[in-house]
Amino acid sequence: MSKTTLFDLDGKIAFVSGASRGIGEAIAHLLAQQGAHVIVSSRRLEGCQAVADAITAAGGKATAMACHIGEMEQIQQVFASIREQFGRLDILVNNAATNPQFCNVLDTDLGAFQKTVDVNIRGYFFMSVEAGKLMREHGGGSIINVASINGVSPGLFQGIYSVTKAAVINMTKVFAKECAQFGIRCNALLPGLTDTKFASALVKNDAIRNAALQQIPLKRVADPGEMAGAVLYLASDASSYTTGTALNVDGGFLS
């Protein structure tokens, strides 16, 4: 009996934003391991190049491209580069996000509000639009939006971040419904508390961490690599009949 090829990504072109560290880095490595040529992206090229070099050193295929998804011009530029270098895109992982303020909702700063909306909503939306146009030209593809459990159950002192992640979940359903006719699937990943630099304000604070663990049946914080397997499922043919879903990978928090 031969092994399944459902998770093979040979010949696929995948773009992962926010891939210089944390969950995005883990996703980039796993997609490359399964055969995809991964475009490693984040705001700074140096961090992207380091991850791309590590993938290449391990025998995979990767290219580094800088893109700040909060800047519309940079989104246009990076997709122009994708068209020029690859001519297609099969997988988009919208993972880059921002959460610049940790405070009571009444103390929300306008600048922090705008930055969070620009990256987490507008950025994801127009990255998906541009990726969708490319995918439509080549018979389809898979868009995966990294949302958050905060999009379902708002995190304390993470007001606008939680609001944007709720928007991402709905956005996922919009693209799933309207792009299915083009062979494009769109799904969301909802990570729980994960040990990353992004979540360090929560993970490294003993009081917050312990309070969170009381609500997580598995009683531990996730490793970034534990999010990558779910993304591989959503990116591959294993999920060929899955679209518009929000996949909780949260140790049971939302159960």
Image: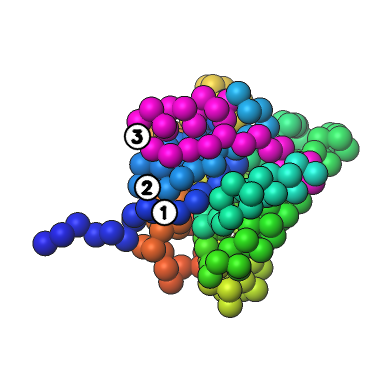
In this view, which residue lies farthest toward the right? 110
Whichever of labels 1 and 3 marks the residue nearer the N terminus, that label is 1
Q: Give the quadrant of residue 239.
A: bottom left
Going by the image, does 49 lie left or right of 2? Answer: right
The numbered disc on residue 11 is: 1
Q: Secondary structure at mark 3?
A: loop
Task: Kindly report the distance in space between the C-alpha atoms of the residues bearing marks 1 and 3.
Answer: 15 Å
51 is within the stretch colored magenta: yes
Q: Which residue is mark 3?
A: 59
Which residue is nearer to you in this view: 197 or 68? 68
Q: Residue at x 57, y 57 (%)?
A: 88
Which residue is nearer to you in this view: 186 or 163? 186
- The nearer-to-camera label among 2 and 1 is 1
- The reply to whether dot 2 and dot 1 touch (C-beta < 8 Å) is yes
Task: Kindly report the distance in space between the C-alpha atoms of the residues bearing marks 3 and 2.
Answer: 10 Å
Span highlighted in magenta in the image: 47-72
Q: Amino acid at mark 3?
A: Gly
